[in-house]
Image: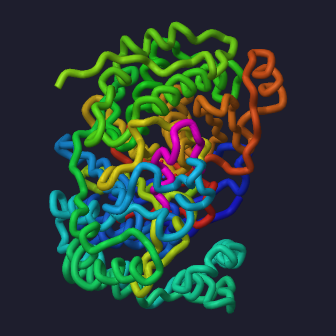
Amino acid sequence: MASIKTGLMGTLLLASSLSGAQSQSYSTRGGMVVSDSKTASDVGAEILRKGGNAVDAAVATGLALAVTFPSAGNIGGGGFMVVRMADGETVAIDYREMAPGKAFREMYLDESEDVIPGKSTVGRWAAGVPGTVAGFWEAHQRYGSLPWKDVVEPAVRIAADGYVVSAGRASVLRSRADRFKPFADSYRVFCRDGDFYEAGERLKQPELAATLSRIRDQGRDGFYKGETARLFAEDAKKHGGPFTIADFDNYVAKVRTPLKGTYKGYYIVTMPPPSSGGAALIQMLNMLEVRPTGRYGPSSPLYVNRLVEVMKRAFADRAAHMGDPDYNDLPVDNIIDKGYAAELAAGISVFATPSSEIKAGVFPPKEGRNTTHYSVVDSAGNAVSNTYTLNTGYGALVIAEGTGVLLNNEMDDFTSKPGVANTYGLIQGEANSIAPGKRPLSSMTPTIVVKDGSLFMVTGSPGGPTIINTVLHSILNVVEHDMTIQEAVAFPRFHHQWMPDSVEWGPGALSKETRETMALLGQETYPTEYGLGSCHAILIGPNGRRWAGVDPRVSSSGASGSD
Ligand code: DON
């Protein structure tokens, strides 16, 4: 067992391996923040103690993660936030990156119309216009209770004073040196120009601190206008990249109505497109309502098989139909329709249906591997579920000169070419093709579960397409398998995304016996060394106590409470 200090709140025990779930959990009566970085959770808890609400704490935690968890925490990327206030009001904030004005449909293809390897994943051309600062600003403008300056200040402080590099981070930074090297600012900040950080040293980010100070003092304009926007545009001009001042000026976070579904009396509040996650989650839960799994154990072949069949069907629709709702008329209502789920579920048998035989639904036209998730609940019962990302670890690997800001490589989430898999092996469709101003399709699934009108669970995860299934597992583990929230997030996971037609299973997820039975049922399986996601969740107990689900797959993760 490893132990993580939770400050005022004592010690949280975490399993050091993924082979078994364990039930030890941290709980509090006040507010709580659970994230991939204990330091960032502490920042959020400090804001709650100062009288801030869940949204204030979510913004402060997100900005702190941009400093302390640089592989995924960001202000150079984007994401999605689902908020549920204590009075039941819900909102989804879409701060997904946007294709820059110079983007075009075939921008990642060569003359033979083949995808150019790496162009959508590394370097300045891989980046979409960042949305994080606009999203946090929008959330704070709507619901924040403390002054903006107070919630930004902790991140400025940690960037300027530095944070202590862990052994894990030191080794990851060293191992990525060759990839950072072509990008001068990244190599200087993360690899100290070859004089690598050792565990225990402080990593300071003065340019990032300066950018964060402008955000603190000028709000969203401190990022999208003036000095910061100018630095991004100049960086693009000097080193070759798409960004212009107009791209930053044009960026807006979009406030959307959350997608809502039900599962056996639980009320699911989740992210609508341009994430596919919420729709797929509701679609899968709908199928499982018709074809219940309750009597199967969470690792049994029949349970795994049932979930895999459900996953294949949802991901087939994702591939065919999903994209930016502002550029496509998406059949979301059809996809989350309970009648449609019943039709799909009727086709599920105990034997595998090959993915090649699973076709996306045909609907009538309608009339007219790095991300980070954190969950926050305050003492009044306001809740925030936030997943944001640079896409893969450290995004495009480029820090735009003088900004200290790592750029995302979210453009790879678009369809570079129909039928050709992206980094996550996802085959995607026309609805997700590239166009200036458009947002790439996502799988991020920040979700809030309500029971009997009261907040029940806040959940979400990183993991590319595996996110959707990780969120599904987290809900089913609690609702169907009576696990504690800590057991639910730690429990081994498996994933199917329609294509490739194979079940990916994380450490401990499928025993040899289960795999053999699965093979007899026609399911191909393959192991992954990754645990599949990092799910940080909060469950509200019957007496209102908040219980932390801290995913042990990320060693720096932790929960903090406000009382
Ligand atoms: O939006 C998406 O679906 C991806 N860009 C998320 C990437 C991700 O989760 C990587 N994390 N491990």
Residue 491: x %, y % from top left: 63, 41
Q: Can you give x and y, in whole percent of width and height, for residue 183 in the image?
A: 56, 80
Residue 473's spot in the image, x, y percent?
54, 35
Residue visible at 59% across and 21% down?
A: 309
Q: Nearer the viewer, residue 108 or 543?
A: 108
Q: Give yes or no for residue 478 being in the magenta stretch.
A: no
Magenta-drawn segment: 409-423
Left of 263 or right of it: where is 490? right
Residue 25 appears in the figure: no
Q: How is the image coloured?
A: rainbow
Q: Residue at x 65, y 73 (%)?
A: 179
Query: Which residue sits at x=29%, y=55%?
Result: 437
> Which quadrant of the figure contains the C terminus?
bottom left
Vertical order, 448 against 211 (above or below) = above
The residue that appears at 41% across and 17% down in the rendered structure is 362
Residue 382 percent location from the top left of the image: 26, 51
- Nearest the viewer among 60 and 136 is 136
Query: Does residue 320 appear in the picture of this structure?
Result: yes
Decide: is 95 above or below 457. Answer: below
Left or right, 408 with respect to 154, comes to right
Per the picture, the main secondary structure of the magenta-coloured stretch is loop
- Left or right position of 144 against 466: left
Q: Quadrant of residue 527?
A: top right
